[in-house]
C-alpha cells in the first residue's frame, strides 16, 4: 500500500517558533497592536487594530478588562482594523465575554474584518458577540438562554488547545510558521466544509497513525503548495 502523502511527525517543544525562514509571514512585517477606547453613553467602545496572536494576548486581555470595568453596561468592539486573529486571541475575547456575563454586562462586536469574521464563523462563536445575544426570543427563557450561552462559551474555549496542537502538527510537518499553519487550517476547513475543531481533531489523531480522509489530505497538500508558491513569488519580487 503506498504511503500517505500526509505523514505528520509528533509535535515537539519547539513548535511555537517558525521553522521555515522563507515563509510568507517572514517576508511581511506584522502590524503592531493598537487599542483605543472611548465612552459611548453607558458603554465603552474598543477599537482594535493590528494582528492578534499569542504574543499580544496579555496586552489585549488587560485592555479589554479595563474597558469592561469602566463601562456600566459593557463594551462594543470595532475589529475592522484587525488583519489577523488566531484562536489564542479568540480565547481572550471569550474569557472577557464570560466575565461580562457574570457581571451582568455584555460584549458585542460592532464591526469586523473578513479574516476575523471567518474565524468567528468557523468556531461558531459569532452569535455570542451579537447585540441582544444575552436575551431570549421566548417569554421566561432568560435564565435558560444565559445558561446555554455560558455552555457555548466554555465549549468554544475548550476547543482551542486542540486547534493549537493541530497548528503545531502542520508547523512540524511542513515547516510552516504559526500564521501560515493557521491559514492552512482555515483554508482546508472551508474547502472540506469541516468545522475547525473537527479538522483539528483529525490532524492530531493522524499523528497517532490514523490516516486522514483522502479529501483532507489533498486539501492540506494544496494549501501548503499555494503558500510555498506565494512565498517564492514574494522572494522573486523582492529580488527585482
Image (cartoon, rainbow, N blue to C red):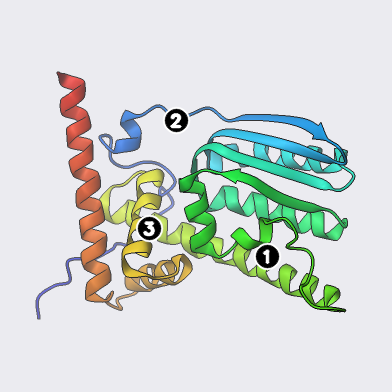
Q: Which residue is mark 1?
A: 153
Give the mark, 3 or 2, whose residue is nearer the N terminus: 2
On the rendered image, what quadrant is the C terminus found in? Answer: top left
x 36%, y 43%: residue: 177
x 24%, y 52%: residue: 224
Residue 176 x, y percent position in the rendering: 31, 47
In screen coordinates, is 69 left or right of 124?
Answer: right
Query: What is the spatial separation of the Cα atoms under label 3 and label 2, in whole angstroms?
Result: 20 Å
**Residue 158 vertical placement versus 68 (above, below):** below
x 28%, y 35%: residue: 21
Q: Secondary structure at mark 2?
A: loop
On the rendered image, what quadrant is the N terminus found in? Answer: bottom left
Query: What is the spatial separation of the Cα atoms under label 1 and label 3, in whole angstroms?
Result: 21 Å
In screen coordinates, is 213 left or right of 76?
Answer: left
Q: Secondary structure at mark 3?
A: helix
Q: Which mark is residue 185?
A: 3
Question: Farthest residue in the left direction?
Answer: 2
**Residue 236 vertical placement versus 219 (above, below):** above
Q: Which residue is mark 2?
A: 30
**Residue 52 vertical placement versus 190 (above, below):** above
Query: What is the spatial separation of the Cα atoms under label 2 and label 1, in whole angstroms?
Result: 29 Å
Q: Are marks 2 and 1 in contact (CB under 8 Å)?
A: no
Residue 48 x, y percent position in the rendering: 62, 35
In screen coordinates, is 96 left or right of 194?
Answer: right
Badge 2 density bin: few <14, some 14–19, many ≥20, Cα 10 Å: few
Q: Which mark is residue 213?
A: none
x 29%, y 76%: residue: 209
Residue 180 x, y percent position in the rendering: 35, 46
Badge 3 density bin: few <14, some 14–19, many ≥20, Cα 10 Å: many
Amino acid at each position: 500500500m503506498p504511503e500517505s502523502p500526509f505523514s505528520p511527525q509528533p509535535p515537539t517543544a519547539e513548535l511555537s517558533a517558525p521553522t521555515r525562514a522563507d515563509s510568507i509571514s517572514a517576508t511581511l512585517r506584522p502590524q503592531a497592536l493598537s487599542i483605543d477606547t472611548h465612552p459611548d453613553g453607558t458603554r465603552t467602545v474598543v477599537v482594535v487594530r493590528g494582528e492578534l496572536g499569542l504574543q499580544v494576548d496579555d496586552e489585549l486581555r488587560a485592555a479589554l478588562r479595563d474597558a469592561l470595568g469602566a463601562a456600566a453596561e459593557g463594551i462594543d468592539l470595532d475589529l475592522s482594523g484587525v488583519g489577523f486573529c488566531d484562536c489564542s486571541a479568540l480565547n481572550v475575547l471569550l474569557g472577557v465575554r464570560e466575565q461580562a456575563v457574570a457581571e451582568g454586562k455584555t460584549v458585542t462586536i460592532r464591526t469586523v474584518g473578513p479574516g476575523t469574521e471567518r474565524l468567528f464563523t468557523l468556531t461558531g462563536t459569532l452569535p455570542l458577540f451579537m447585540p441582544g445575544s444575552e436575551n431570549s426570543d421566548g417569554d421566561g427563557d432568560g435564565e435558560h438562554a444565559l445558561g446555554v450561552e455560558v455552555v457555548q462559551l466554555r465549549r468554544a474555549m475548550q476547543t482551542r488547545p486542540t486547534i493549537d496542537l493541530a497548528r503545531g502538527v502542520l508547523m512540524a510537518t511542513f515547516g510552516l510558521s504559526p500564521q501560515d499553519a493557521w491559514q492552512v487550517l482555515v483554508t482546508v476547513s472551508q474547502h472540506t466544509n469541516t468545522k475547525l475543531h473537527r479538522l483539528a481533531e483529525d490532524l492530531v489523531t493522524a499523528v497517532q497513525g490514523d490516516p486522514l480522509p483522502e479529501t483532507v489530505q489533498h486539501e492540506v497538500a494544496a494549501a501548503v503548495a499555494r503558500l510555498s508558491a506565494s512565498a517564492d513569488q514574494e522572494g522573486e519580487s523582492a529580488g527585482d
